[in-house]
Amino acid sequence: MGADRPRCLVSHTLEINSASWYRWKNSQQCTKFEKSVPYALLCQVAGLKEYIGANPALLQQYSTTAVRSHGSNPSMTGSDFAELQDEFYDAIAAEPVSSDDESDDDKGSDEEHKVKLKNVSWAISNVALKRPAAQDVRKELDPNASSVTIDVSDMHGSLRRGEDDKETDCWTSPSGEGFMIRGKNYLKDNSKVAGGDPLLKLIAVDWLKVDKTADRIALHHRNLVQSEAGKKLPFVLVFNLQVPAKPNYSLVLYYASDRAVSKDSLLAKFLDGDDTFRDTRFKLIPSIVEGYWMVKRAVGTKACLLGKAVTCKYFKQDNFFEIDVDIGSSSVARSVIGLVLGYVTSLVVDLAILIEAKEEAELPEYLLGTVRLNRLKPESAVPLGV
């Protein structure tokens, strides 16, 4: 109150499954919904948050901008609404479109300090979502070390690997495109880019039932790392998410590299650093791909420094490095994971892990690994055993 600045009133809140957008865009017939006012409003704002978030300069340059939209024309007909789906649509589901179709009416809009946000998906896919160069990621591994072939058929975890996202109670390996990470110029303009392919390969996942939190799980005699196939790998990152419940669970992710880690890399700096350094660098990015709105809201999609939020323990030995994350050490994290477990059989969850880049030489960031968990069943968890 009393602030001399532009304000707005939220009059509509809409949530629509993005998977349906592609069908609407390519439909030959307009449904009744596509001719409605809520649909027109949704078309006008779809992707704006992502577009502005990926272009921080807009927040300052156009802090008092009025956004002009064809949708504000009260005389718009149903056919006009149909045209909107070619101009504004969800960038996640649709293909990029050309930017050459801008009308003459919009020329000179920069001089009027008005942002043209037509074809938001094009802006995202061609400006904001550029991947880090693949060669930058591979520099983290020793180029002079001999490479091995990782045969996942020799790697077995208690949770099976799925063939596609339609299966349940399984895991798959998604690309890093769905995760926003710090770009090369982040220290200058806070710009983020879509993650590229992960540095490490996800080889297996354990979904375990335990009586109490289990640290240093890689030392268990039945663990994958202790198998003959596991011992032959140059490097294995073991990520142990300890889930508080009745009973307790451990979701253990195994990531491997085909070559040893380069001694001059950020990853080596993390592996050889002390726990204080590790706590300030290790990040997790969650994303609920499919699930209830309140679960998506609670989990969010922001990167989290795990060592600052919960208790993390680190263990390095031979060819592996283990990170034990005690989710129960934080009341907030415990509440969120409790909500997730209540709906876990209907959720598709993506996770990405990475090391935060804070210096110019460490940018751009890269993903260590990703995983997609498809509708896990708590009862399928396997007892850790003796």
Image (tube, grey):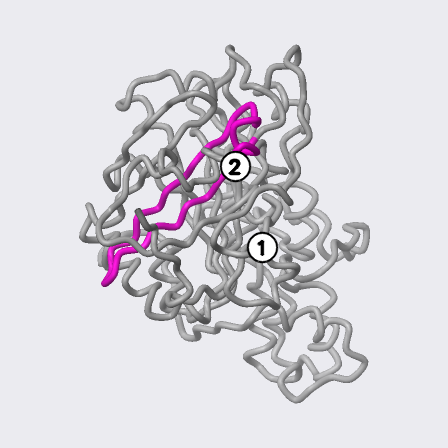
Q: Quadrant of the N terminus?
A: bottom left
Residue 354 appears in view: yes
> Is 155 left, or right, of 35 in this rendering?
left
74, above or below 89, in the image: below
The answer to which of 50 and 136 lies nearer the viewer is 136
Q: In percent of the image, x 57 and y 46: which residue is there? A: 113
The answer to which of 110 and 231 lies nearer the viewer is 231
The answer to which of 357 and 377 lies nearer the viewer is 377
Quadrant of the rendered image containing residue 297: bottom left
Crowding at label 2, few (<14), some or many (≥20) Cα neighbours within 10 Å?
many
Q: In percent of the image, x 65 and y 61: which residue is there? A: 164
Q: Earlier in the sequence, mark 1 or mark 2?
A: 1
152, above or below 354, in the image: below
Per the rendered image, the range of residues in magenta is 228-256
Q: Amino acid at mark 1?
A: Arg
Q: Which residue is mark 1?
A: 161
